[in-house]
Image (cartoon, helix red, strand yellow):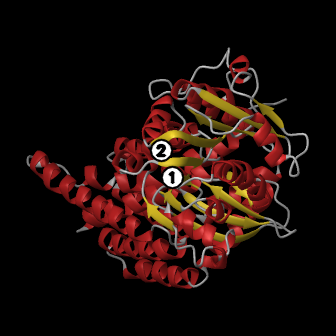
Amino acid sequence: MLLFLVGACLSISQFVMIRDFVTILYGEEVVIILVTAAFFLGLSIGYFLSLKFSDKFFETSFLIIAFLHLTFPFSYRMLAVGIARLDLSGYWYMALMFVYALIFSSIFAVFLPRRIHGETALQKMKILYSMELLGFAAGFAIVGLSWNKGIDFIIPIYWALLAIVIQLALQKKIWTVTFALIALVAGSSLTQIDHRTTALLYENKHSMDNATTLMSINSAYQKVEVMQDGEGERYLYLDGLLNLNASDLKDLNYYIAEIPARLIKPEKTLIIGNGTLSSVPRVYPHSRFVQSVELDVGVLSAGQQFFTPTQELVGLDRWNLIIDDGKHFLKTTQDKFDLVIMDIPSPLTIQEAILHTVEFYQLARSKMTAQGVIAVQLSGPLQLNNRTPARVVAALSKAFKQVMVLNSEQAGRSFAYASNHLPFNLSKVREATQMYEEDLMILSPDDVPAYLTEAVPLAVDNLDLVLRRGWERFSGRYFDDD
């Protein structure tokens, strides 16, 4: 029973620790790898040192660390706030991560080796390790139940399991009761503490004035947070990375959704991403049918509560929403679309980058009509280099015969429209956008290739951009002394 509960605690602590530290350090692929490695290093250290301590030292250290777990995840957030306030180097964040990874995982790793000894060690190993694995699976099931809920759901369960582990491991009711009472008192204010420590993190690490936490949940895929600054501006963060703010939505939806829909008048429109659903009302008047595909229920919840009022979506009987992966939907749908809108995050992780590849655009093309158009936001201005916007446009150019690019200073980024036969020309786009942004720079399909001479198309077997860009951002953020 003890090993089963230890496995469950280990599974839950891994989830909490990795999600929180990825968010604190900002969730590029490099950070996800580093944080995961830190957790498993702590686990390995626990296994290595498990038999090197006396029973007395083990019991004392376990008890101290167990009580420290009552401060998770708030203590390391506040320490990160302190590092940010003092403007310390990135090495302090790394030290914080590895120390807490050691606290989180090593204490659970010592139980199994300490219970395997004697002539029947191998047989015990099989049984006890199986129990720990079953517990880990049970913990993961609890994690699954916590998806799209706040920390106030999973932490009380974790503390309750840890209280039982304390009793079974130490057989001292005084410590079990003390732990349970502190957990009970702390649990009554979990949401308030969670929101306040999150707000302090955004004030000090993201330099957000008078931050307020409106939502903080763990979805199945990422940590979803909605923040509001002192001026009432709302921001959506995914794993600590800014996805959008409310002011940007107007420009983003105008160029990626409304303009192509107005020019094409599509029979069927497909929107992949756009968890806020904010582009749906912009496309709907111009399309006979709109299909939205979004993978993350947590982002949808944030969007509907804080970015797209429910009344804007009421009565849209020609609109349908499916919870699915964009790739899976395109592979399985029998529909053909006149307009495909790719409203997805910048390619900072492998999962996101795949949706910007030649292979994905070829898949999208196979589900488009002859003059179908795909609209993509480029996460920055298109320039003559090998950076993200150029590489995404290069991938589009491999999959489609014609690519037009709009470089909007107002939106702070470029947008691409790609098709085998674009059903509109530069003058039509200019006419449609003139009143919105007079100085909009529009590159015709003949002009775009000049910007791609250095760009290597993103492809499934060529996603170096994810790690390279992630490392540049990570090292520049924490280790650049300039």
* In the image, residue 368 above or below residue 325: above
Which of 316/105 is in front?
316
Question: In percent of the image, x 69 and y 26: which residue is there?
Answer: 445
Hey, which quadrant is residue 186 in on the image? bottom right
Q: CA distance from mark 1 to mark 2?
A: 6 Å
Disc 2 element: helix
* In the image, residue 446 above or below residue 440: above
Q: Which one is earlier in the sequence, the residue at label 1 or at label 2?
A: 1
Question: In percent of the image, x 34 and y 52: which residue is there?
Answer: 110
Which of 237/290 is in front?
290
Question: In percent of the image, x 74 and y 22: which residue is there?
Answer: 447
Q: Is residue 468 visible?
A: no
Query: Which numbered dot is residue 235?
Result: none
Crowd class of label 1 (few under 14; some 14 to 19; many from 20; radius 10 Å): many
Disc 1 element: helix
Which quarter of the rendering shows the N terminus? bottom left
Question: In percent of the image, x 44 and y 77: which residue is there?
Answer: 175
Which of 35/268 is in front?
268
Q: Position of residue 195 (x, y in %)?
A: 67, 72
Query: Which numbered dot is residue 36?
Result: 2
Mark 1 = which residue? Answer: 18
Under mark 2, the amino acid is Thr
Q: Position of residue 158 (x, y in %)?
A: 43, 70
Label 1 with label 2: CB-CB less than 8 Å? yes
Instruction: Give the side of residue 134 with respect to residue 28, left or right.
Output: left
